Image (cartoon, rainbow, N blue to C red):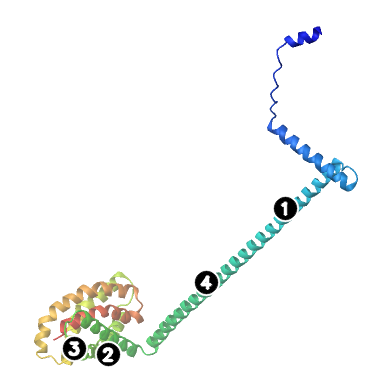
Amino acid sequence: MLSLRLCSHLPAARPMAPVPFSPSFRVWMSTRTSFSSSRSKTSHRSGGPRRPVDKFFRISSHASLGARMALEQARLNAAEHAAALRTNLEQAATTAAKQAELAAKKGHLTARIAISQGKQRSSFFEWYCSKLESHPLATKSITTAGVGAMGDILAQATLSSGPYSPRRTASMATTGLFLSGPSMHAWYGLLNSRFGGRTVGRIAQRIALDQGLFTPFFTPVSLVVIMGLQGQSDVFTRVGNILWPTVSASWMCWVPAQTINFAVVPASFQVLFVNAISLFWSMYVASATSG
């Protein structure tokens, strides 16, 4: 009775607040509860509880199977990438080989064309040299006629304002064929036979004779023939008017040209060298003698 009385004087006990659990503890508890329920269900089905080792092996087998499937997929992907890369490399190599083959064919064709052109030029030069040896007078005369005609055509195209005159071109070609070509052939043959050699004295003698004797005589004769073939009137009067300017221009042009000709060019090609310079000299003469 005393104890009851003492207890009645004690304050009433307050209810205890629930202890808060951490989230991890709650997850562990829920997992354990679900595991216990699954074990109980399994034990009821199979007749006994399943050991944790069996569950471990089951999980390990699933993980191993997944890893093997992932490795197999990675191997397949790597094989596909390797095949695609090999295909691209083969295509690039094939394209490069075709381009190299085309470039080689093009280069070979270009080389063949260049060789063919070189052979043609070489064969033409050899043919011209053979004609100079077999028919020197005819070859030099025909060459001089062609150069004179070409020089007149260029002069009419660039220096003349009137219509083209075929008669004027024919007069230049005729003068070269029957006068200039044969005269130069005979004159240079005489100079080389009497005053041949490559010394400075011999070259000076030939230049002095050529420009001091041949040019003053040949220039008025050629002017008279050209103007006469063109059918101009008062030929001698016009030749007298243009003779000195023409001879002066001839000395300015032909003294340095003949120095190179007598010093360097072989005797058989000296007329050809003169014809090359005459292409421009003929333009001057054609312009000076035009009516």
Where is mark 2, residue-wise?
177
- Name the kind of residue labelled 3 in the image: Ile
Frontmost of labels 3 and 4 is 4
Callout 3: few (<14), some (14-19), or many (20+) C-alpha neighbours within 10 Å? many
Mark closer to the chain start, 3 or 2: 2
Q: Mark 4 to mark 2: distance in Å?
A: 50 Å
Q: Mark 3 to mark 2: distance in Å?
A: 12 Å
Where is mark 3, residue-wise?
226
Q: Secondary structure beneath disc 1?
A: helix
Residue at 31% in and 83% down:
189
Residue at 60% in and 67% down:
91
Residue at 42% in and 86% down:
127
Mark closer to the chain start, 4 or 1: 1
Q: Mark 1 to mark 2: distance in Å?
A: 98 Å
Q: Quadrant of residue 275?
A: bottom left
Q: Nearer the viewer, residue 34 or 176?
A: 34
Q: Are marks 3 and 2 in contact (CB under 8 Å)?
A: no
Q: Secondary structure beneath disc 3?
A: helix
Above or below, 104 against 78 in this view is: below
Mark closer to the chain start, 3 or 1: 1
Question: Percent position (x, y) of residue 289?
Answer: 16, 84
